[in-house]
Amino acid sequence: MKQSKIGQRKTTQREAISAVIRQAEGPLTVEEISERASKLVASLGLATVYRTVKLLLESNEISIVSIPHSHDRYEASDLAHHHHFRCRNCRLVFDLPGCILPIPDGTSLPGGYKVEAHEVTLIGTCPECNGG
C-alpha cells in the first residue's frame, strides 16, 4: 500500500483531491475542491475533503491562500512566487505568472518598515466575464 509523506495511506480520494489542487489555474476553496474531485471519485464526501486538506497542509504539500472577501483557498506549496487575480463577477481566483511588484525581500521602506515578503491580490473581471 502506498504511503504519503506523513505516513497516511494513499487513497483514491486523496489522490483525486491532490490532483485537483495541482491542476487548478488558481487556489481553490474546499467546496471547489470537493466539486471538482467528486467528478473523479463519485463517492467523495465533503468531510473527506476537509480531512484530506488538513493532512495535505500538515505535510506541507499545499498552502493556504487568503484572498480578501473570500474563504480560505488552497494551492500546491511548491509553486514559484506569484500573485492572484479575483474576478468580481464569477468569483474565481486565478494565478498570475511572475511578480508584478519588483520589491526584493529585505527592502527598507520609509518610516522604518522592512519588507520580508509580499502577497498581492488584484480584483476586477476575468477575460471570460469580459466577453473574451
Image (tube, rainbow, N blue to C red):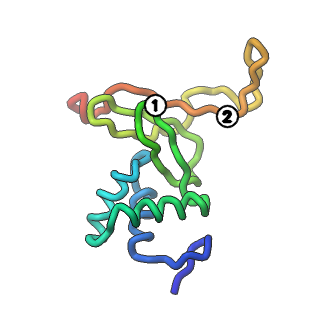
In the orientation shown, which residue stands out farthest toward the top? Answer: 111
Question: Where residue 17 appears, x then y in whole percent?
Answer: 41, 64
Relative image position of residue 125 (x, y in whole percent): 31, 28
The residue lying at 45 percent from left, 41 percent from top is 95
Numbered circle sitting on residue 117: 2
Picture quarter with the C terminus: top left
Residue at 34 percent across and 58 percent down: it is 34
* Mark 1 residue type: Pro
Of marks 2 and 1, which one's residue comes earlier in the chain? 1
Q: Tell me which corner region of the image, top left, top right, bottom left or bottom right, holds residue 119.
A: top right
| Residue name at image x 32 percent, y 29 percent | 88
Which residue is the extreme one toward the front? 47
Three-letter code, disc 2: Ala
Q: CA distance from mark 2 to mark 1?
A: 18 Å
Please tell me which residue lies in front, 81 or 30.
30
* Relative to 48, 40 lies left or right: left
- Residue 49: quadrant of the picture: bottom left
Residue closer to the observer: 34 or 82: 34
Report which quarter residue 57 is drawn in: bottom right
Q: Residues within 10 Å of mark 2 (few under 14, many from 20)?
A: few
Q: Residue at x 61, y 71 (%)?
A: 5
Residue on which disc 1 sits: 68
Q: Residue furthest bottom?
A: 1
